[in-house]
């Protein structure tokens, strides 16, 4: 009798212990998780580059715990996860909300920089290194990225992110200038010389020290020769001559590029120009 009772007690204890072990293996309901548990699972996925999982966990954290230090940090890490997950507009939205809620946060400059990177990512393609020229694309996204980088520099000129933002501003400015030059060249090829002159002049007035400046001068020279306007042609030539020593090597390259462009077939020119607009 005693042995039977003892055996029953042992079995009961083992059963209870087993139930406890099984219970610990069952995942908690989201409503039962602490903010620390949400943040831990989110950052584990974040560090592993599992952006979709990180996004889900950070979104849950914000939903269950909308206030607190963990939530503040989650905005930034969630935005970065969206950026890496190729959802730039979602990243921009999260960062807008972060800046609105925490305008004095020490990482606001980082938030602005990440916003600029997110907008800029819309303006890029992995084919740019091999086939495509981003200057072929619509300038609206380029201008938008330019404005975001400029916003960072205006508000935080001494930020650690300011040097990179400045470099990107120069690149985007050159990209917009080259876009205008491509449009001018397109009009020139269509023998719309006045339109070509207007666009080339726009480059010189709005992007005076860009990479497209010299090619714009070379194109203007050809435009006014076609229009049989010798006085204005001479004016353009004088501008070139005034800077002959400094500009000549680059100008020769610019003219060579134009000659190569003129040798292209009509179809090649058209597809070059509209390449970006069909994406």
Image: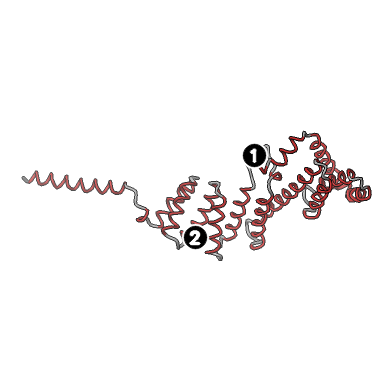
Q: On the rendered structure, is 71 left or right of 166?
A: left
SS at mark 1 in the image: helix
38, above or below 131, in the image: below
In the rendered image, is residue 210 in sight?
Answer: yes
Q: Where is residue 223 shown, x and y percent of the image?
A: 86, 45
- Which one is in front, 231 or 240? 231
Task: Tell which circle, 1 or 2, labels the residue nearer the N-terminal end.
Answer: 2
In whole angstroms, how far apart are the C-alphas of marks 1 and 2? 36 Å
The image shows residue 5 at horizontal and vertical percentages of 10, 46
Q: Residues within 10 Å of mark 1 (few under 14, many from 20)?
A: few
Q: Residue at x 59, y 55 (%)?
A: 115
Q: Kindly identify the residue that appears in the image at 20 percent across and 46 percent down.
A: 15
| SS under mark 2 | helix
Quadrant the N terminus occupies: top left
Which residue is under mark 2?
72
User: Residue 129 location, x and y as percent?
Assistant: 67, 39
Looking at the rendered image, the disc whose residue lies closer to the viewer, 1 or 2, is 1
Answer yes or no: do the residues labelled 1 and 2 have beta carbons within 8 Å?
A: no
Task: Report which residue position mark 1 lands on.
Answer: 127
190 left or right of 158?
right
- The residue at the point 80 percent across, 36 percent down is 260
Residue 242 appears in the figure? no
């Amino acid at each position: 009798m005693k042995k039977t009772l003892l055996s029953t007690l042992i079995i009961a204890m083992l059963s209870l212990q087993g139930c406890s072990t099984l219970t610990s293996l069952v995942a908690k309901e989201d409503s039962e998780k602490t903010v620390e548990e949400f943040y831990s699972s989110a950052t584990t996925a974040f560090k592993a580059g599992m952006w979709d999982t990180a996004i889900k966990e950070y979104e849950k954290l914000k939903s269950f715990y909308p206030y607190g230090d963990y939530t503040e940090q989650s905005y930034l890490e969630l935005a970065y996860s969206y950026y890496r997950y190729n959802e730039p507009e979602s990243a921009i939205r999260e960062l807008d909300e972060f800046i609105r809620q925490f305008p004095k946060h020490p990482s606001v400059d980082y938030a602005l920089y990440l916003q600029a990177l997110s907008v800029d990512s819309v303006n890029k393609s992995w084919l740019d290194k091999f086939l495509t020229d981003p200057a072929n694309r619509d300038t609206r996204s380029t201008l938008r990225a330019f404005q975001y980088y400029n916003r960072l520099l205006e508000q935080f000129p001494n930020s650690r992110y300011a040097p990179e933002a400045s470099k990107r501003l120069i690149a985007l400015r050159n990209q917009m200038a080259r876009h205008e030059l491509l449009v001018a060249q397109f009009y020139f090829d269509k023998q719309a010389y006045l339109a070509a002159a207007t666009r080339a002049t726009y480059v010189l007035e709005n992007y005076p020290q860009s990479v497209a400046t010299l090619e714009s001068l070379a194109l203007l020279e050809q435009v006014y020769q076609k229009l049989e306007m010798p006085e204005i042609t001479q004016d353009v030539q004088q501008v070139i001559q005034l800077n002959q020593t400094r500009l000549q090597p680059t100008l020769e390259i610019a003219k060579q590029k134009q000659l190569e462009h003129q040798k292209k077939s009509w179809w090649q020119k058209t597809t070059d120009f509209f390449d970006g607009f069909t994406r």
